[in-house]
Amino acid sequence: LSATSVMREVYLLVACALGIYLSYIPYGVFQESIYLYKSADGYAFNYTLTLLVAQVLAHTVVAAVTSICLRESSKTMPWKATWMPGATFVSAMLCSNMALEFVSYPTQALAKSSKMIPVMLGGLLLGSERYSLLQYLQVVLVTIGITIFQWKSSKGGQENGALGITLLLGSLLLDGLTGPRQKIIARETKCTSFQLMLGCNAWALLFVTIGLFSPWGEGLEGFAFVTDPANAQLLQYVISFSLCSAIGSNVVFFTLKELGPLRLTLITTTRKFFTIFASVIWFGHILTSLQWLGVAFVLVGVGLEIIEKVGDRSGAAHTGGDKTDKKKDE
């Protein structure tokens, strides 16, 4: 690979990271605001299925509009193949959001910060992926850093009920299955990132809508609560949350196809750190020296990932150049 190709890869990594950060940092603040919201008469928001419908509907619409505007061929649309990642990814979001009804927001973010480990396992089991020791070190550093950062705040939150912890564990497992499977679909069908997003979210919308109107679902009760004029602030949170999620999801699917599930998860995991940092500023939390130590771990982990990427590409370019010269000599 040429120096231009190496720089393109680096720029792509930085651009994807910025796109995810700028979408999902506000997303995290809006999500926390939704689950902290209480109406004038004291009722809290507990309509997770309704929120998921709004979220995946926004995803589906944005993906469809983008795909149409880009005039992407319908021949590569992987409708049948995307039912499984659609089911696993919406189930992961359902488990994660439902957990907020039983555990504190810092606890949820703490558990989700370990997502890279199940993604690695999922990649090994489903996608025949192999990771280097340095990549495992990056995972450990980033996960430890975010864990240290959030440890103090998680102890002061709500009681971590067994059901909430179980939901978070289920969410992690489902996340680990989703990314590698999406990568396989993208490789086998040659679909675009927006087609992959559209397929997964269309299936997700179908599944969550069925759940919404099932005997144990919320029906229209959640919709009535959110659209109540007395809860206008909550409606703004839900709309903003859904739009940020849809825009961010576009970047996520693009990143998945271009960079793979491990690098995507590294970016989204560090994003959780910055989301917590934004929450600290927004809600007036105080950082301890131990939490700043967590910042250092995260920065080292991210730095190692970038250094490894540049080094690998540069080495490949150098090796390729040698082979080319040798062929010319022959």
Image (cartoon, rainbow, N blue to C red):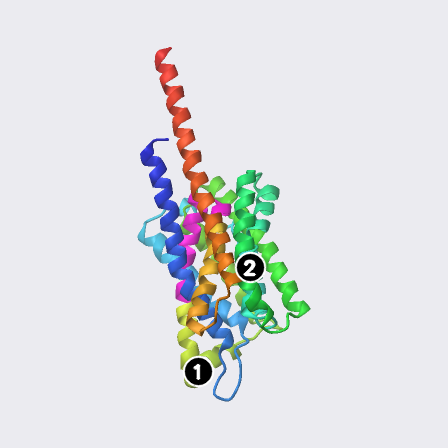
Mark 1 or mark 2, which is nearer to you? 2
Q: Position of residue 297 (x, y in %)?
A: 50, 52
Residue identified by numbered label 1: 231
What crowding class fits label 1: few (fewer than 14 Cα within 10 Å), some (14-19), or many (20 or more)? some
Q: Is 175 left, or right, of 295 in this rendering? A: right
Q: Secondary structure at mark 2?
A: helix
Question: Which residue occupies the foreground of this view, 198 or 184?
Answer: 184
Q: Which residues are magenta?
A: 242-263
Q: Residue at x 39, y 50 (%)?
A: 16
Residue 291 in the image: above or below residue 229: above
Give me the C-alpha separation between circle 1 and circle 2: 36 Å
Say if the magenta span includes residue 93.
Answer: no
Secondary structure, magenta segment, majority class: helix
Q: Secondary structure at mark 1?
A: helix
Residue 156 in the image: above or below residue 4: below
Q: Position of residue 49 (x, y in %)?
A: 54, 70
Q: Residue at x 41, y 34 (%)?
A: 313
Question: Which label's residue is closer to the chain start, 1 or 2?
Answer: 2
Q: Residue at x 41, y 46 (%)?
A: 192
